[in-house]
Structure formats: C-alpha cells, structure tokens
Image: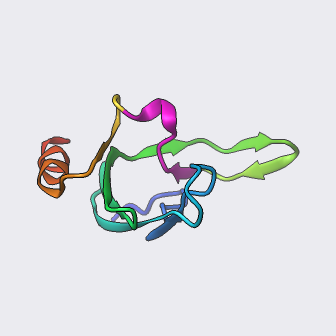
Amino acid sequence: MKTENYERLPEVVSLNGTGIPDLTAKLVKRTKTKAIYYRWDDVWEVFRIKISEEAKIFDKTYPKREVYPGNEDFGKTAWCYSDETLAWKMYNNIP
C-alpha cells in the first residue's frame, strides 16, 4: 500500500481572514480526491482536494501539502452551499 508524501488537511480548519471571526470548518467526509466540510455558520463547502508542492514563501519553507480552497477556486473546483442536500449532490458527483 502506497502512503502519501504530503500533509493532509486537518479535520477542523480555521478560516480566519474571511471577515467572520472564529470561523471554522469541520471535516464531514473525504476521499483521496474530494472533501466536504461543514462551517459553524451553517454553510457546506465541497471541493476537489488540491495539493501544493513544497514552496518557500517569505523565507518560510512549506512542505508538500493539501490546501483548503482559496477564493479563486470557488465555482471551479470548490462550491459553497447553504442547502445540505445540494452539497451532498455535488460531493457525490465529483469523481
């Protein structure tokens, strides 16, 4: 069995910087290619898992890792729903 050589997304993600204080998202389900998180503000985020290569940013080296989608990903590889049924439909449609 092959093990991955990168850090996985955590089960609880801090979404500081969104303008909503203390916003977090909790992992509900994932596979190697997709994930669904639930935010405490009653929003579901569904996305294809994105992997960033090792990089040096502002003199700090970050390892190869999974990254939570950024604003530019929504509508392309990430989607946000206030309706749980629609969120699960999208999750189930991602290969």
Quarter of image, res 57: top right
Q: How many marks?
A: 0
- Residue drawn 83% across and 50% down? 60
- Residue drawn 47% across and 70% down? 12
Across and down, in percent, residue 74 comes to 39, 35
Across and down, in percent, residue 76 comes to 35, 28
Question: Does residue 68 appear to the left or right of 16 in the view shown?
Answer: left
Across and down, in percent, residue 38 comes to 33, 63
Question: Does residue 88 appear to the left or right of 74 in the view shown?
Answer: left
Question: Does residue 46 appear to the left or right of 57 in the view shown?
Answer: left
- Residue drawn 27% across and 58% down? 31
Quadrant where the N terminus lies?
bottom left
Magenta extent: 65-74
Question: Does residue 85 appear to the left or right of 64 in the view shown?
Answer: left
| In magenta stretch: residue 69 | yes
Across and down, in percent, residue 15 comes to 55, 57
- Residue drawn 57% across and 67% down? 22
Quadrant where the C terminus lies?
top left
| In magenta stretch: residue 21 | no
In the image, 32 versus 29, the foreground residue is 29
In the image, 59 versus 86, the foreground residue is 86
